[in-house]
């Protein structure tokens, strides 16, 4: 799990270092590899927005408890690109990666 955590950190740090370039020149000026890094980082950021029990009062969404194994598996898949085909919005306020996949399916059906 250490390698997965470090990989997530590296992607987020690389994204942070690219933000100035993106702000000045736009996404189009990035290499394909950097575009992929940005896309994965944005999905990771969205996925970190899991619904918490303490926020239920404010959001109306019930909190979700995700096991350590599920969390590691999910981030490993994100880092390795297993979910590159899913839209960013699918990762926002979901519990497990399976929830994100289901949400992506619903988003596709609604489009």
Image: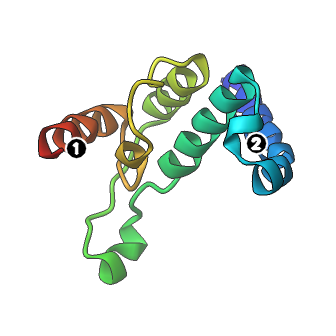
Is 59 on the left-hand or right-hand side of 88? left
Q: Which mark is residue 81?
A: none
Q: Residue furthest left?
A: 109
Q: Residue at x 22, y 35 (%)?
A: 102
Is 10 on the left-hand or right-hand side of 69? right
Residue denoted by label 1: 107
**Residue 34 placement (x, y as % from top left):** 74, 29
Is 111 on the left-hand or right-hand side of 33? left
**Residue 65 placement (x, y as % from top left):** 37, 50
Residue denoted by label 2: 15
Is 108 on the left-hand or right-hand side of 45? left
**Are there few (<14), some (14-19), or many (20+) residues within 10 Å of tag 2?**
many
Element marked by disc 2: helix
Task: State the residue in front, 79 or 104.
Answer: 104
Label 1 vs 2, first from the N-terminus: 2
Vertical side of 40 occupied by 15: above or below: below
Q: Residue furthest bottom?
A: 58
Where, quadrant-wise, is the N terminus in this rendering? top right
Q: Residue at x 47, y 29 (%)?
A: 74
Where, quadrant-wise, is the C terminus in this rendering? top left
């Amino acid at each position: 799990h250490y390698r997965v955590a470090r990989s997530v950190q590296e992607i987020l740090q690389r994204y942070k270092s690219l933000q100035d370039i993106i702000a000045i020149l736009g996404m189009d000026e990035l290499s394909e590899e950097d575009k992929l890094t940005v896309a994965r980082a944005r999905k990771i950021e969205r996925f970190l927005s899991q619904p918490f029990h303490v926020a239920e009062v404010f959001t109306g969404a019930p909190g979700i408890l995700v096991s350590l194994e599920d969390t590691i598996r999910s981030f490993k898949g994100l880092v390795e690109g297993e979910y590159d085909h899913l839209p960013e919005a699918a990762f926002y306020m979901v519990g497990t990666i399976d929830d994100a996949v289901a949400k992506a399916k619903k988003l596709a059906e609604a489009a």
